[in-house]
Image: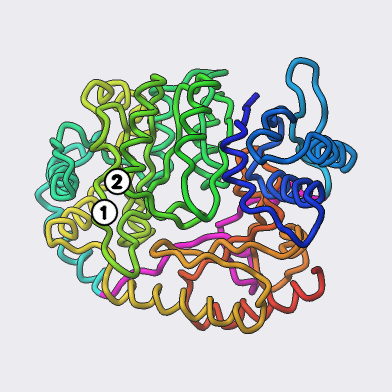
Amino acid sequence: MGRITAISLVAMLGDIDPRQPAYRWLYATLRSLIANGRILHGTALPSERDVVAALKLSRTTVSRAYAELREAGYATSRQGSGTVAQIPGGPAAGGSEPLPLGGFGPVSSSTAIDLTCAAPSAPAGMVENYAQAVAELPAYAATMGYYPLGLDALRQALADYYTARGLPTGADQMIVTTGALPGVAAAGRAVLGRGQKVLAETPTYPNSLLALKATGAKAVGVPIDASGSDISQISQMLHTTGAKAMLCLPDFHNPVGTLLDDEGRKAWARALDASGTVGIVDETCVDLWLDERPQTLPMAAYSKNLITVGSASKSHWGGLRLGWIRSPRHLTGAIARSRMSMDLGVPILEQLVLTNLLNSGKALSEQTRDQLRGNRDWMLEQLAVHLPDWRPNKPAGGLSLWCHLPSPRSTALARKLTSVLLAPGSTFAVDGHGLEHYVRLPYAQGREELEKALPAIIQAWRQVA
């Protein structure tokens, strides 16, 4: 069970609202933090005495706020633990049970617009890149065609990519995979055992978490909000849970969209090392900056125990179906064996395409970057006009907005829609419930699709709000 300190709680509560009684403010703010997943189900709250001292409120005020929290079902008293936060009715109650994430497109014959998946279309010139690779293919035709770790040329190109970003890397540290998810899965198989704990921020990208849980590991969540990763709480959870591995998304976090600075990366890496936890860093969105190119180093620059997973799906094209693992040398053998238990390599043609793209210095095309930036700004403008009580973030990169709703109706909104497939906030929760005040809105689709989808979302929200 996690525990939150009074100091951390004070930072989360913010300033006291003088327009209402202090007990009512404390109760309402605590309830909101629990309902929105900032304080997780099962987390022990600070003692009343500690809250009194930290907030400089009377004991009567704090006791009454805690009592109302318990009466409303957002907390319970446990022997030896004090007051413990909870979701009323338990993890899957209150209409917050998650829907499938989807991402496979509408069912056959459906015309629904799929906003459960966020990925740009192929950039101009991809066909020509394939033609160039086809011309190079005969050189490999006389071989068996099996390259379990990837073509040497691609592994070197990937190593050069990391070295250029400030993380010296050898080709022997690179393993090519069929996308980021198999990379996460291979890393998880190498370092996790059945019943061991894997820590992840909540909300998080659910498919990566599923890949890690497939090892039989137990997922434990630590909250992240619009301000970014809470390193002090991460450090505390690493210490108290004994997690064997942690899923890290420091680069345009999916779905929150935040970008962690170098100081935060360094502190996070130190916390992982101090607890003996292996960090699995998902860099899928690292090249998707939209405003200014970040000057941050890869998180693995701060620890020799971090596994980094990347993908060409967002920065180049999902149809390539290529990803990679950048492994610490002492884990390369274990990860390679884990990866080979899944398949014996990826197609040569796509590897040649990506090798040429990397060697040419091409990442996300400027055309795609401009389109994403334009879609993001257009969607923000439309939400400000038509849904002014929604509070979307404005990410400096990535592929989606993470919107705070004025009422906990995310699942109801997703169910109300018929012409649009939308994933509710609970889909991104580590424990599969809560986050009903949030919804993810991708802007990677074409503008024409978005111009059809957004009015439908606006209309559906007005019906369920």
**Is 375 or 350 nearer to us in this picture?**
375
**Magenta stretch: helix, strand or loop mostly:** loop
Q: Tell me if residue 120 can be seen.
A: yes
**Secondary structure state at the residue bearing disc 1:** helix
- What is the three-letter code of the residue carrying label 1? Glu
Which contiguous range is marked in magenta?
95-124
Where is residue 66 drawn, in percent x and y?
81, 37
Where is residue 382 drawn, in percent x and y?
58, 82
**Secondary structure state at the residue bearing disc 2:** helix
> Which residue is drawn at the image coordinates 13% and 50% (left, top)?
164
- Looking at the image, is 33 positioned above or below residue 83? below
Residue bearing mark 2: 262
Residue bearing mark 1: 350
Image-quadrant location for residue 457: bottom right
Where is residue 163 drawn, in percent x and y?
14, 44
| Residue at mark 1 to residue at mark 2: CA–CA distance | 33 Å
Q: Quadrant of the N terminus?
A: top right
Mark 2 Cα shell of 10 Å, populated few (<14), some (14-19), many (≥20): some
- Looking at the image, is 274 positioned above or below residue 5? above
Where is residue 388 drawn, in percent x and y?
65, 77
The label nearer to you, 1 versus 2, is 2
- What is the three-letter code of the residue carrying label 2? Asp
C-beta proximity under 8 Å, tags 1 and 2: no
Left or right side of 76 for 120: left
Image-quadrant location for residue 166: top left
